Image: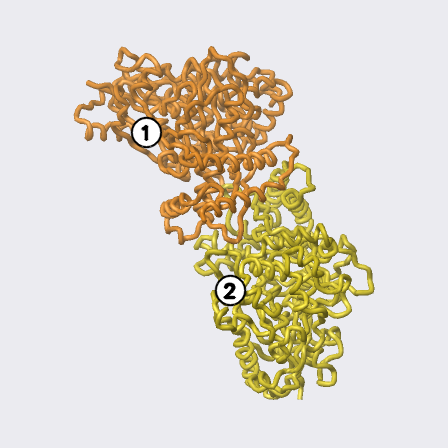
Chain colours: A orange, B yellow
Amino acid sequence: MAPYVIGLDFGTNSCRSLLVDVATGREVAGNVYPYPSGTDGVILDPSEPNLARQNPDDYLLAIEATVKGAIREAKAVDPGFSPKDVIGIGVDTTGSSPMPVDEQGQALCFQERFRENPAAMVWLWKDHTGYKEAAQITQLAAAERPQYLSKIGGTYSSEWWWSKILHCRNVAGEVYDAAGSWIEICDWIPAVLTGNLLPRDVKRSVCAAGHKALFHPSWNGLPDEEFLDSLSPGLGALREKLYEKAYTADFRAGTLSAEWAAGLGLSPSVAVAVGAFDAHMGAVGAGITPGTLVKIIGTSTCDIMIHPLEEPLQDIPGVCGIVDGSVIGGYYGIEAGQSGVGDIFLWFVNTLVPDKYGRTQEEKFDNLEKAAAALKPGESGLLALDWNNGNRTILVDVRLSGLLLGQTLHTQPHEIYRALLEATGFGALTIIDRIQEYGVPVNEVVNCGGLASKNPLLMQIYADISGRPMKISRSDQTPALGAAVFAAVAAGEDSGGYGSVSEAQNRMVGIGKTYSPAVENHRMYKKLYSLYRQMHDAYGTQDWSGRMFNVMKDLLDIRDAVRRSRE
Amino acid sequence: MAPYVIGLDFGTNSCRSLLVDVATGREVAGNVYPYPSGTDGVILDPSEPNLARQNPDDYLLAIEATVKGAIREAKAVDPGFSPKDVIGIGVDTTGSSPMPVDEQGQALCFQERFRENPAAMVWLWKDHTGYKEAAQITQLAAAERPQYLSKIGGTYSSEWWWSKILHCRNVAGEVYDAAGSWIEICDWIPAVLTGNLLPRDVKRSVCAAGHKALFHPSWNGLPDEEFLDSLSPGLGALREKLYEKAYTADFRAGTLSAEWAAGLGLSPSVAVAVGAFDAHMGAVGAGITPGTLVKIIGTSTCDIMIHPLEEPLQDIPGVCGIVDGSVIGGYYGIEAGQSGVGDIFLWFVNTLVPDKYGRTQEEKFDNLEKAAAALKPGESGLLALDWNNGNRTILVDVRLSGLLLGQTLHTQPHEIYRALLEATGFGALTIIDRIQEYGVPVNEVVNCGGLASKNPLLMQIYADISGRPMKISRSDQTPALGAAVFAAVAAGEDSGGYGSVSEAQNRMVGIGKTYSPAVENHRMYKKLYSLYRQMHDAYGTQDWSGRMFNVMKDLLDIRDAVRRSRE
């Protein structure tokens, strides 16, 4: 018998299972379950565009549907497969997506009185209702606990744990008061699967704790009571309902509960790994090692690196977080990100592209890509900033917006489309430059996520802009594959798994295609990148005091030079 | 019998006749003739996007078709009308649109050898092939004849007379050498109608001469031979083939030639007025007086004022021209303009608006306007610069481009449409501010041209941005009506016309609708205008050294404040 593991990837709109051959990483079977609640799985409030919640019951339905679906498919395609050969389950989720639970660890919204109350549900990562609380936390930390900010890029985000909990306390006191604890869904799902739900017993993810909850060993875990009480009198009392330790995902959360084992048709000896966020597990599924930047490119990006604990590492301004063990134990996990990538392209195509480019979104993308690919860098005279959804790294500022410059009376949609692709490429290079400036060498870039496999023009542009090969992960499902890697490690060698993450990676993950930079394009993009940085610094930083006058002239000169070079 | 006059308006794509009752200004009949040559009357060169020429034969066909058409219609609608009651013809044209002619004043392209040669045709106003020559002229004048630049806003344009003639000499020497003279079409058409074609005898328009050919009494007419020879050795010899005097349009070019009188069925006693440019005659047709700014709003705008000769007037930097008599004798004509207005809206609607806003351009405009009108100033968070076609006044710089700032993932086409309308309104206010800063009070704004009558939202936005009433000319055809006013003056009192332009204006022109500014909108637009000016100065001038950082923050604050005010 060959051992198998299952990775469960809880996304924003659906959950995906991936059943993987432990020996080779072969993806044997998988299944996707769209969440039934809300709009595409997200509970919205028309009067509050910042609100985005999720129904935790959807996750329970998703586990059953996707695990059973994968097993069914595996049986069909792989005659040698038997459910009893599954040795581990790994879980990755979105985050920070905290949820209030009762003292037994059950979701508060499972109680009748809170069933329709969005404050009692999962506060999805993209819920920004706590933006004022985030500003308050940043302000207080800057004044009283600057060390808190040094590990998270200098600004506490409205997407994160404490902003959401504090906002809940401010606007839905009855929910806050009823909560026996709060839990990230990456911790809650393994807890559910193992049946170890008691909040103080749950093995919390160091990835979530360190990146989102200001958890750090140097100040003894979570923020101290005094700090929390200064934020909001009484908030400090929550601290003891939470946790003092946090774990890397190669730890076992436990084994499958008898109830779930029976329900899923799996053995109760199946190891369940400690959970972590999708991007971090995705980085592992893409083959992260020291010196590798993994970009998970979808609606936004998450950029992940690791750095050996024993080597010095300074704080990197604007990088979202540096957390011991958040990706792989024994390494710092470094997390950065671009807050708008695929979302910007989708917005443009769905909003500003006329039907002559195609009737469907897919046709429009196809035709735009064809026409945009025929352009040379600089030829359109356009330059954009990729800030339609703010800027995460390196500016850490949601209050920024998009900018398009250089349009004439002849500018065409595919030119703008290319300018938007390029803008995200410049944003990507800005992150690489910042990380290297602070002493972490970026020797390799591996891309994964939907756009890495679906948008060759984007990848070629990234290669041309950065002057680096853009490697594409072999798997299209790196988060689920990363979760499967951790499942194999949590199961351990004795069960047919692996003794370490790197050993598991060596066997289970790899690189597919590589895009090589074109020298001539890179030379042109160096000029455009310098203009992008001028605009970036002019609009994005307060300490810039130069002039903008040359921007349009330079763009026109470049455009004209390109046109002449065609003659 | 009531006297009638005919105004002939030679536009970019067609010619229009307007047959007007001299006593009341009633527009009795009219006719439009689209030019048959080229693309919509413009001869293009796919390999040279700057080229735009016209076939002068189209004008001759147009005279016959439109005059006869108007007479036919007048007979049908006005039983009292007889062609012998027509006492005058006035002519306005685009410009600077010069043409090489032989020594008899006939178009060079009427010769077989030049029939297909674009250099021998009319160099249409929007031909920019002479952009390098324009820069050379500006440079030489700045060094050697700074006085030349002081009357034209500091920069000689590629659209103007000398740029085109010099470019012709540089690229089509055989045409240049064959030319017995050069002539603006506003001078050539009256010359044709009167039969007085000899280049030295043609009464040249002071409007064309002063605004486009560096003609000024203080340096004895056209630029001196030495200057021209410095531009290009031998060019100075052209000077004596041109003219030493120039005339206001209340002068008579002559009376209708026997041939044309017979051909058109009019009396040979019909007075033909000296020609002028469409915008200047349009200003007269809109009722210009001292203190009135007339905006002719179409694909671009022309902004015209007059100022009494006896009152002091300093040079106004960035204003395209200040010319004695170019609008009305006895006054300085002041010409400014925005290089892109309707063209920008057309570009946007035809390029970036999906079909859900409508299948036709007209439907799209209608639906965009409805949706945009529902927005409050500042609500979209967007800000645009109106520079897709460069900036004429006050920056006099064709090497500028468009800019859109503030877009998010939720920005909609009608929001961008409104931002573009607003951008042209800010551009309009920038011109008003500049003119007033230099001591010319703007007491009234009268708008005419296609967009003034067809786009109520645009006019309301201009009122709200400027805090001034926007008056709309009663006539939809102010250039043709202005030409008719000059026809009535050229005919003179003895023939049933008028003794002065102001007397004719009092009887023949008037105001239709007025848009009043909304106080609250004006207050908001003051803030947005200040941001527009920050961007304007940052990107458009070299002497600006401030910071850009606040722009997006301020826009978001404004947007949020507006949203809150809706709650």
Q: Is A485 positioned to the left or the right of A353 in the image?
A: left
The chain to which mark 2 is attached is B
Is residue B307 visible in the rendered structure shown here? yes
> What SS does tag 2 mark?
helix
Give, as a three-letter code, the residue at label 1: Gly
Q: Amino acid at mark 2?
A: Pro
Quarter of the image for the C terminus of chain B: give it.
Answer: top right
Q: Residue furthest left?
A: A79
Of B214 and A468, the residue lying toward us: B214
Q: Residue B381 at what x, y percent from top left?
A: 58, 44
Q: Which residue is mark 1?
A: A512
Pinpoint residue B447: horizontal percent, then vertical percent.
Answer: 65, 63
Q: Which of the 4 image quarters holds residue B548?
A: top right
User: Dot 1 falls on which chain?
Assistant: A
For the residues marked 1 and 2, what is the alpha-carbon distance in whole angstroms? 57 Å
**Mark 2, residue position:** B118
In the image, residue A97 lies at what x, y percent?
A: 46, 27
Q: Residue at x 17, y 23 (%)?
A: A80
Residues marked 1 and 2 touching at CB (< 8 Å): no
Residue drawn at x 45%, y 28% as measured from the top left: A302
The one of B562 and B139 positioned closer to us in this rendering: B139
